Amino acid sequence: MLHGRRILLIVSGGIAAYKSLDLIRRLRARGATVRCILTAGAQQFITPLSASALSGEKAYTDLFSLTDESEMGHLRLAQESDLLVVAPASADLIAKMAGGLADDLASTALLATDKPILIAPAMNFRMWGHAATQQNIATLAQRGVTRVGPNAGPLAENESGMGRMAEPLEIVDAVEKIFRTGETLKGRRALITSGPTHEPIDPVRYIANRSSGKQGHAIAEALARLGADCTLVSGPTEEADPPGVKVIHVSTARDMQAACEAALPVDIAVCAAAVADWRAEAAPGKLKKKDGATPALKLVENPDILAGLSQPGNRRPRLVVGFAAETENVIANAKAKRLRKGCDWILANDVSASTGVFGGAQNTIHLIDADGVEDWPTLGKREIGDKLAQRIAAFLIVKAAE
Ligand code: PMT
C-alpha cells in the first residue's frame, strides 16, 4: 500500500503518455497522493486537465508561469514528494537527466531533487538500442535511478521490439518495492503522543494550550512510512488520523497516560504532546457568576508521561524521545529537562510567540542527547518527522549491531 506517500509523476512525450493516466488512478487507489508535471511533448498526447482531474491536484506544465512559481516552485514540487516517477521517460528526457540539463520544469525538478527516482522508459526500439541511450541509462543506474521496463512488444507506427513502456501495474509494483526497501523500522513498535490535553474546570470549561498536533502526527506518519507499527495517542486536534497508524483519541493528561501505558511494550516512544502540567480540581456542576466574585481554581499536578516512560525497567522503550518547549535559554533548559525526565533524546524547540511553532507549519529543532547538541535547520514539520524517523532507524540499527 502507498498510504501517505507523495509521488511526483513526470510525464514526457510519447504515445505511452495515455497509460500514465491509468497509472495516476492506480497509484491513488493504493493511497498515494499524485502530483503531475507534463512536458510540452506530453501535452501533445494528454492534457493537463485530464491529469489534474484524475490526480485531484493541479497539473504543472513546462510553462514557468508566475502563478506556478509563486504557488509551487519547482524546488518545493520535488522536495515535497517522497518519490519522482518518470513515466513515460522519453529518450530525450533520459538524455537530459544523464547530462544534467535543466531547461524546462520537468528536467529542472529532476535535477533539483535528492529524492529517489524511478523511470519507465518508452521509445522506438532503435532509439532504445542506440549507444547514446544505453550510455545514458547506465549513467542514471550508476546514480541510483531505478528503472522499470521497457518491455518488448508492439510499438507505435506498426513496429515491434524493445521500447514499450512497462504496464501501469508493473510500475505501481516497482513503486511499492522502492518504498518497501526503505522500511528500516519494520517489526518495531512505536508510541507517539501528540496535541494538547484538555483539563476540565467544570462540565463546560477546560484548560488547554495552542498545540495543533501537527508535529506529533507528522512524526507518527513518518515512523509508519519506515514500517514501524505505530500507536498515536492524540489529544483533541483538528489533524486527520495519519494513514497506517493506530490512533487513540484522548482528552486529559490522565487519559493520555493510561493510553500510553496500555500501548506498552514498544521499542520507541516519542512524546510530542503538550501535556498540561496541572489540572484543575474540576467542579461537578457549571461554575456560576455570583455577585462579581471570581472563583479560585485549585490546580493539581498531572502525571508526567515522559518521565514515567523513561523510568528504568523491563518495560522501558529502547529509545525514549521527549520534546522541550522553551521560550528562553532553550538549550540549557532542554539539557536540564532531559536529565530530569530521564529520556534518551530531547528535541528542543523555541515556542516563543514570534516563532509561530505552536500551530505553525515549521519548526527549528535542536536534538540533544548524551553526546551533545545537533542543530537542525528550520524545516516543515513533515520533514522534521522524516528526519527524526531516519535518525531513530539509524540509531536502532547501530544498537542492534552492538
Ligand atoms: O502541536 P504543534 O502545534 O505542531 O506544536 C508542536 C509542539 C510545540 C507542541 C512540540 O514541538 C513540542 O514542543 N511538544 C512538547 C510540548 C511540551 O509540553 O513541552 P514541555 O517542555 O512542557 O514538556 C517536556 C516533555 O515532557 C514533552 O515531551 C512533553 O510531551 C512531556 N510531558 C510534559 C508534561 C507531562 N505532564 N507529561 C509529559 O509527558
Image (spheres, helix red, strand yellow):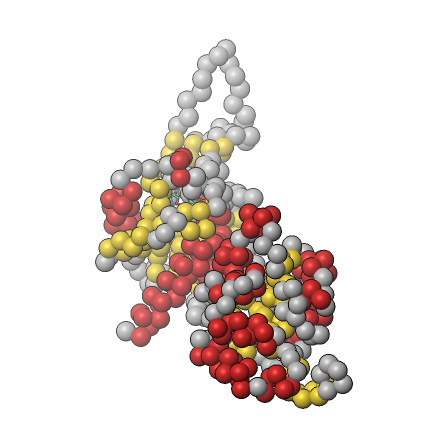
The residue at the far right in this view is 158
Q: Where is residue 382 in the image (x, y as percent from the top left)?
A: 47, 54
State the residue in front, 120 or 266: 120
Check the image and report above or below for 151 versus 35: below
Residue 397 image-quadrant placement: bottom left
Q: Residue at x 51, y 76 (%)?
A: 146
Which quadrant of the figure contains the C terminus?
Answer: bottom left
Q: Position of residue 248 (x, y in %)?
A: 53, 52
Check the image and report above or below for 170 versus 340: below
The answer to whether residue 254 is left or right of residue 14 is left
State the residue in front, 108 or 166: 108
- Within the displayed image, which quadrant is ligand 1 positioned in? top left
Residue 291 appears in the rendering: yes
Q: How many labels does the image show?
A: 0
Check the image and report above or below for 218 versus 8: above
State the residue in front, 231 or 381: 381
Residue 27 appears in the rendering: no
Q: Where is residue 27 in the image (x, y as percent from the top left)?
A: 64, 67
Q: Position of residue 196 (x, y in %)?
A: 46, 42
Check the image and report above or below for 153 versus 291: below
Q: Which residue is drawn at 42% across and 54% down?
A: 384
The answer to whether residue 203 is left or right of residue 386 is right
